[in-house]
Image (cartoon, helix red, strand yellow):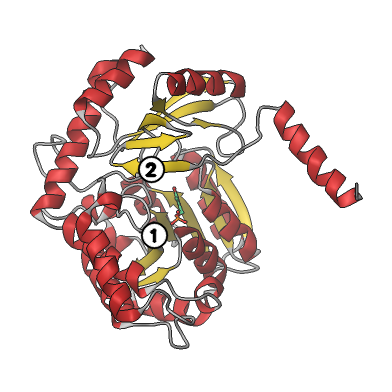
Amino acid sequence: MTSFEAFLRSALQEAETQGLRRKLREIDTIRGTTITIGGRELHNFSSNDYLGLAGHPALAAAMAEAAGCWGTGATASRLICGTTKEHAALEEELAAAKGTEAALVFSTGMAAATGAIPSLMGKGDVIILDKLAHACLIDGARASEALLRVFPHNDLEKLKSHLKWAREAHPAAKVMILTESIFSMDGDLAPLAEIVALKERYGAILFLDEAHAVGVRGIPVGVRGNSGGVLGQGARGLAGELGLGDRVEIQMGTLGKALGVSGGYIAGSRALIDFLINRARSFIFSTAPSPAVAAACRAALRIVQSEEGDALLSRLHQNLALLASELKISTPQSAIIPIILGSEERALAEAARLLEAGFFVPAIRYPTVPRNTARLRITLSAAHEPEQIKALAELMK
Ligand SMILES: *Cc1c(COP(=O)(O)O)cnc(C)c1O
């Protein structure tokens, strides 16, 4: 065995011993929220397809039609010959949905964050991150070579003291706050109004990752009580829902979760988007997303902003209310419900027990979440049937 091969095997063995080794699961078939793995039918409570759009025939039709028209690949990066009318239209429609001047599509949300952050921030600048920020924000921050400061999750006092320090110690620096509107592994909300007020007070910039909020928040009045929502607004994200959209400099999101396709985007001012077109390396040095993918995203956006989209949102929120009442927990603020169990072993054993009973609920472990906070992460979709939710809750009691 070469020493390189020995290195690989010992790293894997160590992960195995700690209960941290990950393996891929191959899905044989998908039919709505039912998947088959290894010949077994399972109720899927692990996907981020919150509205069930990934299986929507209108998206598949849009994708097929565009592939027939444009071919399968974009054939080049966006700045060479990879920008089709589909890409341009998607970006215009995204900007309109978010209420910003402009938007820019990347091949993934990960690429959007890791490309944009280091293009905007550099040595001598200061980045302040929430402790639970997604890996794409952390990697983008690190790559920027800016000074980094972390505040405990949603801790406004600590955020404020970092901002104050940054302003005093680095008066000429750009200061950027990185956070999520809905946290991916906890499903809770950032105190966005307070964060916006703080960043304005200290002259900072806010980069907000709305990956889990778009398509999930911004819903009709009466469904979530006092949202004050307007119909057809499901693509706005939390910033839009709270009327804070034009006070957040950089709104980032994914097209791969509630929108059911793939890709990432940044929405903001025209100058921001033009700057990113010129500077964001993951945008410049990467083949453009397929025009067929862009067409499917456009179809998803149309649905989310239609009456059908409102009905799907209502359905999702009814499902969330049902699970909450069955489990006797308060109604979740997002489609993500973490059940924190602590040790890796306990989370794995619980996931295995549910799997045995026909329910796929993933165990989430370090390094995705901090040590000793291993958990089951239930995600709900508008496509779940009430019977599936009741059966899951029964098993979890
Ligand atoms: C999934 C996710 C991303 C990455 O988006 P992709 O399009 O999947 O690359 C970014 N931020 C958060 C919070 C996410 O959950």
Specify the quadrant of the image occupied by residue 314: top left
Mark 2–mark 1 Cα distance, whole angstroms, equals 19 Å
Question: Residue 279, image x and y in percent?
Answer: 52, 78
Residue 249's disc number: none
Q: Determine the residue positioned at 29% across, 64% down.
A: 297
Q: Which residue is mark 2?
A: 29
Does the beta carbon of the residue at mark 2 sit less than 8 Å from ligand 1?
no
Give whichever of discs 2 and 1 has the lower sequence position. 2
Question: Residue 286, image x and y in percent?
Answer: 53, 75
Residue 39, above or below 199 = above
Residue 385, above or below 146 = above
Q: Which residue is mark 1?
A: 262
Helix or strand or loop: what does disc 1 sit on? Answer: loop
Q: Residue furthest bottom?
A: 80
- Is residue 102 visible from the viewing direction of this image? no
Does the beta carbon of the residue at mark 1 sit less than 8 Å from ligand 1?
yes
| Badge 2: residue crowd in 10 Å (few <14, some 14–19, many ≥20) | few
Viewport quadrant of the C terminus: top left
Mark closer to the observer (2, 1): 2
Q: Determine the residue positioned at 38% across, 79% down.
A: 271
Kind of residue at badge 2: Thr
> Could you tell whether 25 is left or right of 145 in the image?
left
